[in-house]
Amino acid sequence: MRLRTAAGVSLVVSLALAATDKSQPLNVKIGLWQMTYTTERNGVSVGQAIAPGLLAKMTPDQRARTEARLRARAQGPRVETKQYCLTQERLKNAIFDSAQSQACQRTMLASTPKLQQFHEECIESGTKRMADGHFEALDFDTMKGSIKIKTDGANPLALNVEIAGRWISNDCGDTAQ
């Protein structure tokens, strides 16, 4: 689930940074960026996070440890810092649409050199996911943003992600993200 959440957050950030034909890209530098994500998660119980068959096979001690880990994850924010390569193509083109599911509908609400705002709705495998993103270019080498993600269905989840980005270098090196 951690990998899926990180991949989802990365995709949403990428989608927010990518512009569509009607939009204007954020007025920020191209190159290597350091992105700090502060993620708070709500709404996942043990029964929702673990398959019922696996849960039934756990000893009481294993179940108690698993419940404690899930509670700790839900109670406090998790902070991750990653490097991200922002290319001219990523900034100007909607190249991340190829990774976006056909089951998703994204609407750009604002797209200016200082602000990118979007709303996205997806329905996949009977689960509806809604995401609202807001990104601001504070100056050429600093940006901030937020993403709020909610899912309905069998495993409801709410994620709030605050993002702070700062430009590091013109050269991305080996960073593929």
Image (cartoon, rainbow, N blue to C red):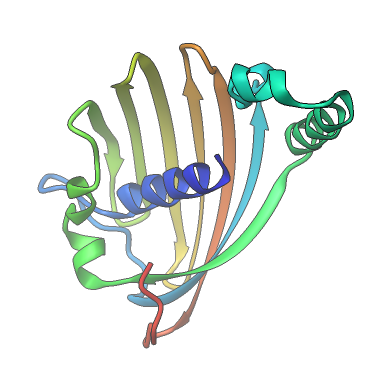
Q: Quadrant of the C terminus?
A: bottom left
Is 83 on the left-hand or right-hand side of 117? Answer: right
User: What residue do we see at 17% from left, 48% from top?
Assistant: 98
Quarter of the rendering containing residue 80: bottom right
User: What residue do we see at 33% from left, 54% from top?
Assistant: 17
Q: How many marks?
A: 0
User: What residue do we see at 39% from left, 44% from top?
Assistant: 12
Residue 15 percent coordinates (x, y): 31, 48
Q: Is residue 9 above or below residue 107?
A: below
Q: Nearer the viewer, residue 3 or 108?
A: 3
Q: Quadrant of the N terminus?
A: top right
Q: Is residue 82 above or below residue 53?
A: below
Residue 119 percent coordinates (x, y): 34, 29
Is 137 on the left-hand or right-hand side of 74? Answer: left
User: What residue do we see at 10% from left, 48% from top?
Assistant: 21
Residue 164 percent coordinates (x, y): 57, 58
Residue 175 percent coordinates (x, y): 40, 77
Q: Is residue 39 above or below residue 148?
A: below
